[in-house]
C-alpha cells in the first residue's frame, strides 16, 4: 500500500466523500468525526508516493491532525491550548469501523437477463434487488459471505469482495436437461406465493403453459390464482379481492395500462414474447407499488439479449405474432420488436340462450406493436425505452327473442373500438459511493369509443329506431418519477420516491342527453413516499412506509401509512401481515340508465364534484413450503369509500342523479400446490362477499351485494411434462354473481364453470426450435355470462352477453 504512486483529483468535494472514495479504492481504514469531515471541502490534482502522504495534506488543509493507530488513520481536531496535555491514545473500541460498499446486479445465467426481486442474505440480514436486479449495501467487512436466491433458480452461496464489479448469475432449476436444451426452453416458469402479504410472483411467465397462452398470457395465468375472479370473464377490468372497475393498477415497464386486454377478452394488450416476469399484489402492499385502492399488477418486460440475434414467429388459426431481438453497439444494447395481427374473425355465430336470450354475430380485429430498447453503459448505468401500441375494433348484433306483445324483435347494433398507447424512458444510475437512483418518464393514453343503435323490427320487417347512443371517453396519464434506494446499512434498507403525475379525461355522450357532453377535466398531483425495510433478526422483518399525495387543485395532503411484516416461525412455516391506507385520484364510475344498462366512465377525483377514493386493507396470511407440497392461506378485509355512481331517469326524472357510496369486502384465499417429478398440480379456492351501498339526499341505503360478488370459486390445474410433450388441463367453478346494479331486481345466480385444455409438442428441425400444439378454451361449450355486460332493452327483457365460447386454437411457434 505504501510503495505505490497515488494520483488524486477532486474539485470542491467534501472531505467525508473524499475519504470514503479513498477507503473504497485503496482498502484503507479511516476514522473521522462526521461533523469535522463535513466542514471542509477538498480541491486537489496531485500525485503522492503513498496514501498516508495524501491524508496528511488533507489534514493540514482542514486544520486537523492525523494519527496512525494500529493501521487505522485517525483524523483529530488540533487542541486549542498548547499547554494542554496531549490526548491519550484512542482505544480501538472507540474507533468506528469503516464501512465497505458492495453493489452489483443479479442476472440469469443463460440469457444475461436481469432478475428482479432477488433475495440476498448476509450476516442474518437481508435485502431485495430492484426491478433491474440491482443491489447496494454497506458492511464493516471487506468480504461478505452471501446467499443469493430467487424463485425458480438454484440458490448461490458465494463471497462478495469490496471493490469488485459484482455480477451474480443464477442458473434456472432444470429438471430434464436434455429435452429442455434441445427445445430451447431452458427457463422454468414458476409461481410463488406467501413471501409477502397478498403477493404472488410469476418468474419466466413467458414459459408457463396454460390453455390460451398464445394470446392473453397475463390473464390466463392470473385467473387460476385464488382471489382473482375467473367467473364473469370481465372485459372491463380484473376483479381482485372484490374490486370494482378501475380500482386495479396494471403497469408495464412504468406505463399505466387503463385496459390491459382487448375488447375480446382472450387477447391481452402486452405481447407474450416481450414479457419476462409479473408481480401481483392483491392487497395490503407497501408504498412502492401502484396508485389505486385495490390490486397492482407489475409487468416486467425483457431486457433483450445483447450478444446474439433472436427471432420468434408464431401462427395460430386466429392471429400471427412475430418477435425480433437485435444486438446493437458492440453488444452493449438490444432492440426488441414484437407485433401481432388477427386475420380471421375470432367469433362465429353462437347458439342462442334458452327462450328469450341473445344471438351474437360479431366481427373483431386486433393489432399491436411493442418496442423496447435497452443499453448498459460502462459504469453499469442502464437506459430502457419502452413503447406499447394497440388497436382493436368490435362490431356485433344482439337480438332478443320474438316479443308477442309488441309483435316484433328488439335488436341492438353495437360498435366498439379502443386504442392503448404508452411510452416510457427509465434511466438507472449506480452511484460510486453506493445507492441506486431511477429516473422514469412515462405517458399513457387510452381512447375507447362506443356507439349503440336500438332498433325494433315488426312482423312486416319495418324498422323503427328507438334510441342511438354515442360514447367517447379518452383518458391520459403523464408522470415523472425519481426513486432512490440507499445501501443497506445496520439492518435498514431505505428508499424514497418523488413524483409528479397528471391525468386528463374527456367525456362525450348522446346517451345522457347532453348533461355530460364535452365534459373535460384534469388533475395534477405531487407524490412523495418513503419506506424502510427492517431486518429485526433472521426470523422477523418489517417494512414501514408512508405515502403523501397533494393534488394541485386544493393542496390538501393525503397521508397513506402502511406496514408489512414477515415472521419465519420455522424453515417451512411463514406468517405475514399487511395493513395500509390507499387513495386514488382517478376513478372509473358507473352510469346506469332507467332500464338498468350500465356504462363506465373515467373521471378525475377532484374532491369537489367527485370524491377521492380511499380504502383500508387488512391482510393476514400463513404459508407452508416443503418438498411434499406448498400451502398458502390468506384472510383479508377491505373497506372503501368515495365510490360514485350516476343514475339517469331515476323514478321517471330526466336528470342525472349522483349517488355516493362505499363498499366492504371480506374473504379467504387458499392455494395448495404439489409437484411430482416434472408434473405440477394445484387447487385454489376463494370464499368472499362484496357488499356496497349508496346514499342520496342524506338518505342512506342498506348494504347489498355488489354485481361482482361471488361466494365461492374453485379452481384446479394439472400440468403434465412428458419429455417433448406437455399437456395442461384447467377447470374453474363459481357459484355465480348478481351481475346487476338494480337492487330491487330478483336475481337467480347462474353458476359459472369452464374447462380448458392445451397440448404442446416440442421438437428441433435444422437448428430451428419449434413448438406446436392446440389450445381449447371452454372445452364443453358452457354458456357463461360476462360480468357487467348485460343489456336491458325497453320492453323489459334482459340480454346476457356470452362469455368465451368453445374456442379452439392451433398454433406453431418457431424460434431462430
Image (cartoon, rainbow, N blue to C red):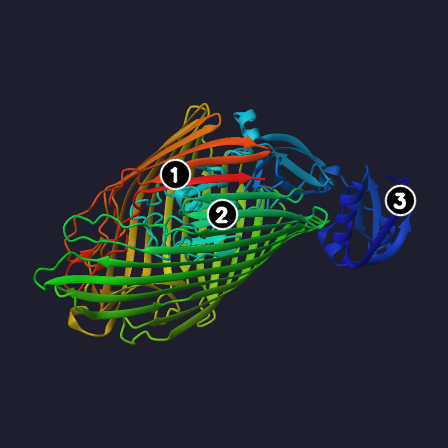
The answer to whether the residues at label 3 and label 2 have Cβ atoms under 8 Å apart is: no
Return the mark for residue 321.
2
Q: Name the secondary structure under disc 2.
A: strand
Q: Is residue 289 visible?
A: no
x and y percent of residue 123 in the render? 61, 34
Q: Nearer the viewer, mark 3 or mark 1?
A: 1
- Image position of 772 with respect to 784: above or below: above
**At 41% from the left edge and 44% from the top edge, which residue is drawn?**
317
Q: Name the secondary structure under disc 3.
A: loop
C-alpha distance separating marks 2 and 1: 16 Å
Q: Which numbered disc, 3 or 2, marks the residue that appears first in the sequence?
A: 3
Q: Is residue 332 visible?
A: yes
x and y percent of residue 94 in the render? 72, 41
Q: Which residue is mark 3?
A: 50
With 114 as the anchor, is 65 left or right in this view? right
Counting the numbered discs, the total is 3
Q: Residues within 10 Å of mark 3 (few under 14, many from 20)?
A: some
Q: Nearer the viewer, mark 3 or mark 2?
A: 2
- Decide which of 700, 429 is in the foreground and name it: 429
Q: Which residue is mark 1?
A: 775
**At 23% from the left edge and 64% from the top edge, which residue is drawn?**
695
Q: Name the secondary structure under disc 1.
A: strand
**At 39% from the left edge and 43% from the top edge, which residue is drawn?**
220
Q: Quadrant of residue 405?
A: bottom left
Q: Residues within 10 Å of mark 1 (few under 14, many from 20)?
A: many
x and y percent of residue 487 in the render? 63, 46
Q: Which numbered disc, 2 or 1, marks the residue that appears first in the sequence?
A: 2
Amino acid at each position: 500500500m505504501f510503495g505505490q504512486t497515488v494520483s488524486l483529483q477532486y474539485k470542491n468535494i467534501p472531505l467525508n466523500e473524499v475519504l470514503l472514495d479513498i477507503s473504497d479504492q485503496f482498502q484503507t481504514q479511516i476514522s473521522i468525526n462526521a461533523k469535522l469531515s463535513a466542514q471542509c471541502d477538498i480541491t486537489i490534482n496531485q500525485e503522492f508516493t503513498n496514501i498516508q502522504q495524501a491524508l496528511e495534506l488533507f489534514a493540514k488543509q482542514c486544520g486537523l491532525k492525523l494519527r496512525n493507530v494500529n493501521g487505522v488513520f485517525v483524523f483529530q481536531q488540533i487542541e486549542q491550548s498548547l499547554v494542554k496535555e496531549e490526548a491519550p491514545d484512542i482505544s480501538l473500541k472507540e474507533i468506528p469501523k469503516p464501512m465497505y460498499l458492495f453493489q452489483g446486479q443479479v442476472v440469469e445465467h443463460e440469457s444475461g437477463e436481469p432478475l428482479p426481486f432477488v433475495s440476498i442474505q448476509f450476516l442474518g440480514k437481508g435485502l431485495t434487488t430492484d426491478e433491474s436486479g440491482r443491489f447496494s449495501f454497506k458492511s464493516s467487512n471487506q468480504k461478505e459471505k452471501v446467499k443469493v436466491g430467487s424463485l425458480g433458480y438454484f440458490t448461490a452461496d458465494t463471497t462478495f469482495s469490496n471493490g469488485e464489479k459484482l455480477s451474480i448469475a443464477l442458473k434456472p432449476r432444470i429438471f430434464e436437461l436434455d429435452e429442455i436444451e434441445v427445445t430451447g426452453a431452458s427457463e422454468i416458469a414458476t409461481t410463488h406465493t406467501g413471501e409477502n402479504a397478498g403477493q404472488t410472483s410469476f418468474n419466466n411467465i413467458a414459459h408457463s403453459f396454460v390453455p390460451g397462452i398464445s394470446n392473453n398470457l397475463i390473464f390466463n395465468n392470473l385467473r387460476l390464482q385464488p382471489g382473482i375472479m375467473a367467473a364473469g370473464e370481465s372485459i372491463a377490468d380484473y376483479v381482485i379481492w372484490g374490486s370494482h372497475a378501475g380500482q386495479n393498477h396494471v403497469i408495464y415497464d412504468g406505463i399505466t395500462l387503463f385496459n390491459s386486454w382487448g375488447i375480446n377478452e382472450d387477447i391481452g394488450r402486452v405481447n407474450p414474447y416481450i414479457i419476462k416476469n409479473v408481480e401481483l399484489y392483491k392487497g395490503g402492499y407497501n408504498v412502492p407499488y401502484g396508485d389505486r385502492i385495490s390490486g397492482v399488477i407489475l409487468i416486467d418486460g425483457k431486457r433483450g439479449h445483447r450478444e446474439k440475434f433472436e427471432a420468434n414467429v408464431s401462427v395460430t388459426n386466429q392471429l400471427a405474432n412475430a418477435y425480433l431481438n437485435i444486438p446493437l453497439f458492440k453488444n452493449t444494447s438490444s432492440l426488441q420488436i414484437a407485433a401481432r395481427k388477427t386475420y380471421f374473425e375470432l367469433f362465429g355465430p353462437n347458439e342462442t340462450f334458452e327462450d328469450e336470450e341473445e344471438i351474437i354475430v360479431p366481427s373483431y380485429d386486433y393489432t399491436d406493436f411493442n418496442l423496447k430498447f435497452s443499453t448498459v453503459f460502462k459504469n453499469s448505468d442502464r437506459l430502457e425505452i419502452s413503447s406499447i401500441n394497440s388497436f382493436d375494433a368490435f362490431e356485433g348484433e344482439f337480438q332478443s327473442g320474438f316479443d308477442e306483445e309488441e309483435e316484433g324483435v328488439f335488436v341492438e347494433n353495437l360498435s366498439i373500438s379502443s386504442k392503448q398507447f404508452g411510452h416510457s424512458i427509465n434511466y438507472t444510475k449506480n452511484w460510486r459511493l453506493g445507492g441506486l437512483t431511477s429516473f422514469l418518464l412515462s405517458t399513457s393514453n387510452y381512447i375507447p369509443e362506443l356507439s349503440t343503435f336500438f332498433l325494433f323490427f315488426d312482423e312486416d320487417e319495418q324498422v323503427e329506431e328507438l334510441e342511438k347512443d354515442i360514447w367517447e371517453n379518452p383518458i391520459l396519464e403523464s408522470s415523472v418519477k425519481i426513486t432512490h434506494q440507499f445501501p443497506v446499512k445496520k439492518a435498514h434498507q431505505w428508499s424514497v420516491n418523488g413524483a409528479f403525475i397528471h391525468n386528463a379525461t374527456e367525456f362525450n355522450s348522446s346517451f345522457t342527453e347532453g348533461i355530460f357532453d364535452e365534459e373535460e377535466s384534469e388533475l395534477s398531483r405531487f407524490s412523495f413516499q418513503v419506506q424502510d425495510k427492517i431486518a429485526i433478526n433472521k426470523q422477523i422483518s418489517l417494512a414501514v412506509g408512508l405515502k403523501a399525495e397533494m393534488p394541485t387543485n386544493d393542496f390538501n395532503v393525503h397521508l397513506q401509512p402502511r406496514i408489512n411484516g414477515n415472521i419465519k416461525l420455522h424453515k417451512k412455516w411463514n406468517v405475514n401481515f399487511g395493513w395500509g391506507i390507499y387513495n386514488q385520484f382517478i376513478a372509473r364510475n358507473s352510469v346506469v340508465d332507467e332500464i338498468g344498462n350500465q356504462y363506465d366512465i373515467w373521471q378525475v377525483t377532484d374532491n369537489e364534484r367527485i370524491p377521492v377514493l380511499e380504502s383500508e386493507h387488512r391482510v393476514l396470511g400463513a404459508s407452508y413450503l416443503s418438498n411434499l407440497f406448498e400451502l398458502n392461506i390468506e384472510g383479508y378485509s377491505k373497506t372503501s369509500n368515495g365510490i360514485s355512481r350516476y343514475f339517469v331517469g331515476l323514478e321517471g326524472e330526466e336528470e342525472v342523479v349522483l349517488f355516493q357510496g362505499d363498499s366492504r369486502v371480506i374473504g379467504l384465499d387458499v392455494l395448495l400446490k404439489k409437484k411430482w417429478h416434472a408434473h405440477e398440480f394445484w387447487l385454489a379456492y376463494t370464499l368472499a362477499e362484496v357488499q356496497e351501498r349508496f346514499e342520496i339526499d342524506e338518505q342512506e341505503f342498506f348494504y347489498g351485494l355488489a354485481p361482482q360478488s361471488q361466494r365461492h370459486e374453485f379452481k384446479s390445474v394439472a400440468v403434465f411434462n412428458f419429455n417433448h410433450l406437455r399437456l395442461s388441463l384447467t377447470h374453474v367453478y363459481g357459484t355465480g354473481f348478481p351481475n346487476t346494479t338494480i337492487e330491487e331486481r330478483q336475481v337467480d345466480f347462474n353458476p359459472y364453470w369452464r374447462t380448458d385444455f392445451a397440448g404442446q409438442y416440442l421438437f428441433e428441425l435444422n437448428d430451428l426450435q419449434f413448438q406446436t400444439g392446440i389450445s381449447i378454451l371452454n372445452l364443453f361449450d358452457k354458456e357463461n355470462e360476462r360480468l357487467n355486460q348485460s343489456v336491458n332493452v325497453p320492453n323489459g327483457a334482459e340480454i346476457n352477453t356470452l362469455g368465451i365460447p368453445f374456442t379452439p386454437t392451433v398454433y406453431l411457434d418457431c424460434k431462430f
